[in-house]
Amino acid sequence: MAVTAPDFVLAPRPAFAWRKLLAAMGPSYLIAVGYMDPGNWATDIAAGSRFGFALLSVVVFSCLAALFLQKLALKLGIASGRDLASLCRERYSPSLKVFLWITCEIAIVACDLAEVVGMAIALKLLFGFALIVGIGLTAVSTLALLTLEKAGFRRLQALVIVLVVVTGACFVYEIAASHPSPGELVAAFVPARRTLTDPYALYIALGIFGATVMPHNLYLQSALYRRQDFQDKREAVRFAGVDCTIALTFAALVNAAILITAASAFHWTGHSGVAGIEDAYRLLTPALGAGAASTLFAVALLAAGQNSTLTGTLAGQIVMEGFLGWSLDPRWRRLLTRTAALAPALAVVMIAGEGAVSQLLVLSQVVLSLQLGFAVVPLVRFTGERAIMGALVNGTATRWTGYTLAGTIVIANLWLVAWSVA
């Protein structure tokens, strides 16, 4: 069954602007959940425990970059009536098209790998399942939730928003219990030099960036708004942009809360070596002196992991359909992606033991960062072509900002690869 555009359009000229805004609300929350998945948790915990608040500026920059790129993606869908993947198929050679498809599939599998491991850890922490059993259970969990799509896209969106709220509420409690210093938080918004001079700090920073700005989310965002009969495209872009800003700001606050909680609980209490989710769970309650801290931490992890698998399925279907013209039943697509993610997760647990999964989580997010440039460059190029965008074509400032961001991503990744080889 092919994935079709969701059943939402901006209401035709309602009496009040707030009604138009409400009509546009919802789609970007499917994107936002990908910005608070278990991969984000792993990188934020590693950053906070090892470097304190030093990499908080990376979280802020990553979220601003994500917001900029996601708005370009939704504008592309609204203006052209097509998604990023299908435009790549139309505009690029067959070999380049296949290459870009493969890089995006790698990103989707890397993301799903993080969700598999994160949900398995949550099941272990909450119910005592062995990690390898939890990994197996994740193979069927998403299939059950995908049946909600038959009940209507709005109900699926409602479930996603509920799980987002659960995740956020848990971290309101966590950050309140951690009592961070306001002065140190403000100072942390200034980028730290060690991000560029310390190779491990750069590695974690790129992991944060890859966990935040996911390549397949750009394809998904453009597809959520394709084939819609908008009466006023500029107005549609404006209200969809508000929806995107609200959703991604919420995701940014959750990511910042994870890093701040880790820094407050571990970095200044003699536990700066904490880099794993399980260690964080074990130490949170004694470190913060809050009895529910560890349990709510695990509940939020389970909600975030389950949420992200839903959007991964939709993105995978859209990418395959857009690049290759292939259409699969979402259940089969989910099974293929999850099988590809299960293999490395099971291999790491069986060969290296459960203690190695935290490093696997961070590595998966760095892989996402390495794939990002292959999605950003076409996005900036297409939104800068008047033949595609019409009156909504990027202005000079937007175009140069996009290419500067793409160049920064590519250079940082090349730097990391060179450091790794050396």
Image (cartoon, grey):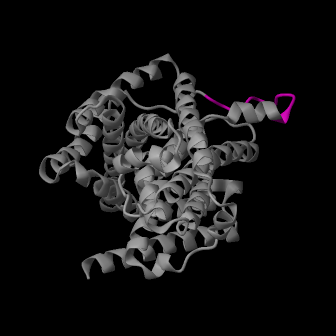
Is residue 309 depicted above or below 411 in this figure?
above
Q: Is residue 239 left or right of residue 40?
A: right
Q: Is residue 345 left or right of residue 223?
A: left
Residue 154: x and y, percent?
57, 24
User: What is the magenta segment's predominant secondary structure?
Assistant: loop
Is residue 393 depicted above or below 84 in this figure?
below
Is residue 273 depicted above or below 161 in this figure?
below
Q: How many numbered circles does the render carry?
A: 0
Q: Is residue 15 magenta?
A: yes
Residue 150: x and y, percent?
45, 18
Q: Quadrant of the C terminus?
A: bottom left
Taking depth in this image into account, of 102 and 132 the one nearest to the observer is: 132
- Give the residue furthest to the right: 15
Question: What's the residue at 45%, 52% (across, down)?
Answer: 40
- Give the residue furthest to the left: 351
Q: Quadrant of residue 1?
A: top left
Q: Is residue 274 left or right of residue 251?
A: left
Q: Quadrant of residue 192?
A: bottom right
Question: What's the residue at 22%, 48% (across, down)?
Answer: 354
Question: What's the residue at 27%, 30% (across, down)?
Answer: 137
Q: Is residue 59 magenta?
A: no
Residue 275: x and y, percent?
37, 58
Task: Give the magenta-colored segment's residue range.
Answer: 8-17
Is residue 82 something that shows in the picture? no
Taking depth in this image into account, of 160 and 81 the one nearest to the observer is: 160
Q: Is residue 383 left or right of residue 109?
A: right
Residue 410: x and y, percent?
44, 72
Is residue 8 something that shows in the picture? yes
Taking depth in this image into account, of 37 and 237 the one nearest to the observer is: 37
